[in-house]
Image (cartoon, rainbow, N blue to C red):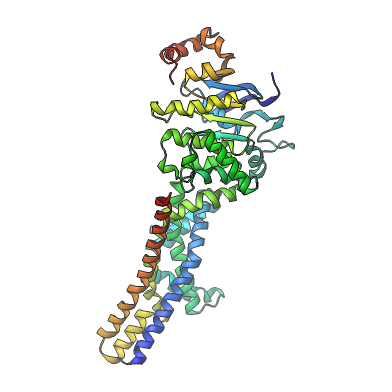
Amino acid sequence: MAQLVLDVAGISKRYGDVEVLRDVSFQVGKGETVCVLGPSGSGKSTLLRCINWLERPDAGQIYLNGAQVGITGGGLVMGDRDLSRIRTRIGMVFQHFALWPHLTVLQNLMEAPVQVQKRDKAEVRDEALALLAKVGLSEKRDSFPAKLSGGQKQRVGIARALAMRPDLLLFDEPTSALDPELVGEVLVVMRDLARDGMTMVIVTHEMGFAREAATRVLFLDHGRAVETGSPERFFSNPETERARQFLQRYAGDAAGGRR
Amino acid sequence: MSGGDIAAIFQGAIVTVTLSLIGILIGLPIGLGLALLRWANVPVLARIVALYVSVSRATPLVTLLLLLFFALPNIGVPVSPTSAAVLALVMNTSAFNCEVWRSALANFPKDQYEAAQSVGMRAGLRFRRIVLPQIVRVSLPGLVNEMSMLIKATPALAVVGVVDITRAAVRIGAQTYKPLPPFLVAIALYVPIVFVLVSLQRWIERRQLAAKVAA
């Protein structure tokens, strides 16, 4: 594996009596695109949210570029300051976009690089404009999010995360809230990122995308990492019965390669 | 009604406006602070705030004022009528403001907040740059409404001897045996005071709308 970016080691999480994640481990190397697949309620989103500590795992460790996330060198739970510093390295794209509605598209992109990273405003602006061009939304830079379609909002969401120059990008079902005809434009952007070597962990139900763009898939079931491997192997010849059943339900999608 | 009488009512208007303004300017941020304590669910403090707000909202302003004015000297805190009046106004309005802010905070979309966390914004920055600009917009009508209620509650301050618009009018009516003119003057003064507030709200809303349309 290339240089290790993310190391998830034995993460567990429970809500009351429900064990959402059970001892989940996986690693992501630089430039990899790992798609996390699994039935609804299998813990995919929770796993993703544990990586940047939006959810606090009950057990296990997470390392980003070798540094532990959420726990200080002294073994204490990190405060707001330390956690925030690490989060600047981990971008996140949300299912419902989560753009800031009181800011324009360009302001959404510039907010954190200027306010958090204290980078030069003119430089951030140039970079933000380049990112908007990359996601095909240059002409929307002064629009407010309310004026955008779902697909456009999500592309802004991706550009906003990229504006921080993160080492790792997390996607939480980025196309699940979109009308079917808008899914494609978001997947195109994500595929470009994969091709450019962005390191990504993507929770998705888009089997066609996972098959084509993932370097590896991770299959979760009932909070366990049941299977991991190359998309070719996983989709054509899954090891476990659970994965087989899961894929059968998506057979139409995967074969049709929904765009 | 003599010119001196009219001047007396204007004097009352200055008292009304000054005390209301002080009450608003102090009560507004305190209300926000209380709402934040409840929003963040700070242990113990959140409970105390909840109790404080319930009691303050349930207590009539007159009763609260009388309590402060007569009880505080009893426990060794001397208060003038004016300071008791300001204290009562602040306690009253901060409790109502707290509820307005709190409902805006409670309805604030969680994922927007998480998006701010995910780009590494610290708590202060998240609040100042992402939450506050939006809850101000949502809360504004409720807050302005509460401000105008506060202004209209100021005649209650007369019970401890504060001479506001209404108290001045009552006095003149009693002296001249012609209550109609002073009360008409009084109402003529309340209307523009509240109107200024409502205009301010409209102006802010229009500016926000203009910013959106321009985009």
Q: Quadrant of the N terminus of chain A?
A: top right
The x and y percentages for residue A188 are 50, 26
Residue A196 appears in which quarter of the rendering?
Answer: top right
Q: Is residue B195 above or below residue A149?
A: below
Residue drawn at x 39%, y 26% is A180
Q: Nearer the viewer, residue A70 or B49?
A: A70
In this view, B133 is above or below B201? above
Residue A255 falls left or right of residue B178: right
Q: Which image quarter is the C terminus of chain A in?
A: top left
- Estimate the x, y position of residue B50 in percent, counting from the top left: 47, 54
Q: Residue at 53% of width from left, 27% of height from top?
A: A190
**B52 or B116: which is nearer to us?**
B116
Q: Residue at x 71, y 32 (%)?
A: A67
x, y percentage for residue B68?
48, 72
Counting every numbered tag in the picture gives 0
Q: Is residue B22 above or below residue B13?
A: above
Residue at the spot 48% in from the left edge and 34% down from the top edge: A154
In the figure, B22 relative to A81: above or below? below
- Residue A150 visible in this rendered orientation of the protein: yes
